[in-house]
Image (tube, rainbow, N blue to C red):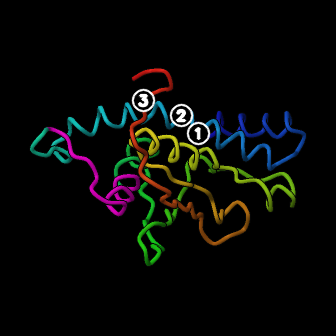
Amino acid sequence: MTLTYGSVVSQLCRDYEGNYSLVNKQLHKMGYNIGLRLIEDFLAKTTTSPAFSGPSGSRRCTNFKETAEVISKVGFKMFLNITPAVENWTADGKQFSLLLDENPLAEFVELPDDRAMRELWYSNILAGVIKGALEMVQLEVDAFFVSDVLQGAPTTELRVRFVKVLEDEIPAGED
């Protein structure tokens, strides 16, 4: 997986001729599209698990703190076999950080130059996956990296900010 992902990032860097802002956007978009589809697999596996069964057979998170814990302890564990720490909550409970002690996407990676170390969010696909998956369960969030060990930071920190609960909408022209 690490080598395949590295090839994707490397190709995007070539395609966008080193414009890391565009690479970051494309990685986020790719992750978003993955998240839209990945949530189905996640829900299929977790709603049949006794750990997530409630009286009705499945259990929804009742608040954003529960959502954060499920992302960390179930989602990341299920798909990447890691469990990031959930920390740095804001006082209003609408933002938290996922601190990744390890990042399987970034194993054996060295960024090519100083500009890449400053501008490229190598694992930005993860931020997109979180945004896309949560959107499918009616939560609009912003997800973005604030630090990365690949850029010389002591830890990799992915920030998630609650925006709003999405209402079910009827498509235009359908009543």
C-alpha distance separating marks 2 and 3: 24 Å
Q: Amino acid at mark 1?
A: Gly
Q: Quadrant of the C terminus?
A: top left
Give the magenta part as a residue range.
57-72
- In front: 93, or 22? 93
Q: Say which residue label 2 marks.
A: 34
Q: Say which residue label 1 marks.
A: 31
Circles 1 and 3 in contact, beta carbons < 8 Å: no
Q: Say which residue label 3 marks.
A: 170
Structural crowding at the residue carrying mark 3, measured as other residues with C-alpha within 10 Å and reported as few (<14), some (14–19) or many (≥20): few
Q: Nearer the viewer, mark 1 or mark 3?
A: 3
Q: Amino acid at mark 3?
A: Ile
129 left or right of 149 in image: left
At numbered mark 3, what does the secondary structure look like: helix, strand or loop? loop
Structural crowding at the residue carrying mark 2, measured as other residues with C-alpha within 10 Å and reported as few (<14), some (14–19) or many (≥20): some
Relative to 101, residue 49 above or below: above
From the top left corner, tell me how far across and down residue 171 is, in percent: 47, 26
Circles 2 and 3 in contact, beta carbons < 8 Å: no
The number of numbered badges drawn on the structure is 3
C-alpha distance separating marks 1 and 3: 26 Å
C-alpha distance separating marks 1 and 2: 5 Å
Circles 1 and 2 in contact, beta carbons < 8 Å: yes
